[in-house]
Image (cartoon, grey):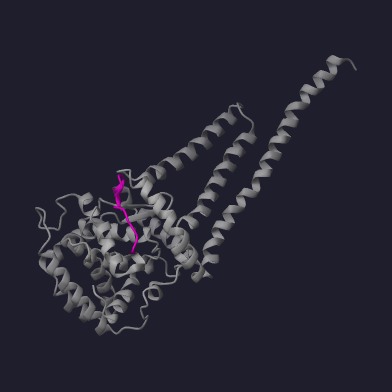
Amino acid sequence: MNCAALHAILLNMKPHAAQQNTWRALLRRLPWLLMLPLGLYLPRLAAAHPSIVERWFSRGLYPYVSAALGGLFSILPFSFAEILLYALPLCAAAALLWSLALWLRRRIPLQRVVSVLLTLCIIGSAMLCAFYPLWGFNYARPTLYELLELEPAEYSADQLKTLCSKLASQAALLRGQVPEDAQDVFTLPQGYRAYFARLPAAYARLGQSVPLFARKTYPAKGVLASMGMSRGGIAGIYIPYTAECNVNVDQPPLLLLSSAAHETAHYLGIAKEDEANFVAYLACLRAGDPAIAYSGVMLALIHATNQLYRADPDGFAAVRGLYSDGMVRDLMAYNAYWDAYEGAVQEAVTDMNDHYLKHNQQTTGVQSYGLMVDLLLAWESKGFEK
């Protein structure tokens, strides 16, 4: 065989060998996908060791992680998390579609397409795993009953009615101190940012009386695409990757400010929804602002009267009679707003949220939002300063 023939054979072998090497390189990256089952298993592992989570994560690592991220991203006047939420899926889809287009035009081999897909899967798995050391382990903390030394107990309908009556009277008093719009509905004439800016001071006051919450917080941020959140029935969301509290600012003012306080409670490591609502209520009362206090009390009142209606319809009717005309108008405007967004999208998002909460060991799923009433009653029975 002459040299020219041998050279031709070697040239024909190189592409095949290169392809084999590429497939081997892809196979060597497959173990990184084990992060996916690890991320799915982490909440179960953490839930089995709440005391360890509390000591080493919630009061150990997490305050430093959230403080660093919170301080960094608080510099920005907008939500960086919202940008990531749009950019990451779009970039992932664009990269995959572009590689598919090049492969169909025979500009790149199939291995390149598989490589892009594998890279995206690895990034997604890594983000799932990172979610827990950045914040998600807080789901496994001991309950606020334990952390605040409250006594979980069964409460009577009369006790619930007494709580609702107190909240209704408190809300009626605060309602007389807040501004109204042209339709005589509660409004925020200074704009939501001015009120959000007052919530860190409210949490600082709460931390003085309840050391569990004695950490620096930052103002929540309004989401630009808030109307899209409304379509999904979402009032707010905490993003651990940037430690930003994101709030749907298109919603009516009635619970807008308590939504910001709720997301701030998440920043403090209160992961469970019922507990975050309870902490938001406590913080709103300490804001020194009637509008913020009114939003917090109405949050508690709505949850408490929902329970009272199921337990004692007559008692609910009696409490309802304590509502001022302004409170009734605010509730009607609030309900009308959310009713307009009811539909398949909201049902789908609610179902996703339900599965997310259950995956993170909140066994009642979205129903956990109603459990704050037990905390209110326990707090009330202890006679704590409100």
The spot of residue 348 in percent (x, y) is 40, 56
Q: Which residue is rendered at x = 38% and y = 75% of the image?
A: 145
Up/down of 48 relative to 102, above or below: below
Q: Which residue is rendered at x = 22% and y = 67% of the image?
A: 297
The spot of residue 315 in percent (x, y) is 21, 81
- Residue 310 visible in this rendered orientation of the protein: no
Q: Is residue 223 magenta?
A: yes
Question: Which quarter shows the C terminus?
Answer: bottom left
Q: Main secondary structure of the magenta part?
A: loop
Q: Which residue is rendered at x = 52% and y = 66% of the image?
A: 46
Residue stretch in magenta: 214-226
Q: Is residue 128 magenta?
A: no
The spot of residue 171 in percent (x, y) is 17, 69
Residue placed farthest to the right in the image? 1
Considering depth in this image, is 124 or 333 the residue closer to the camera?
124
Q: Which residue is rendered at x = 61% and y = 34% of the image?
A: 112
Q: How many marks?
A: 0
Question: Which quarter shows the N terminus?
Answer: top right
Q: Quadrant of residue 238?
A: bottom left
Q: Is residue 251 left or right of residue 27?
A: left
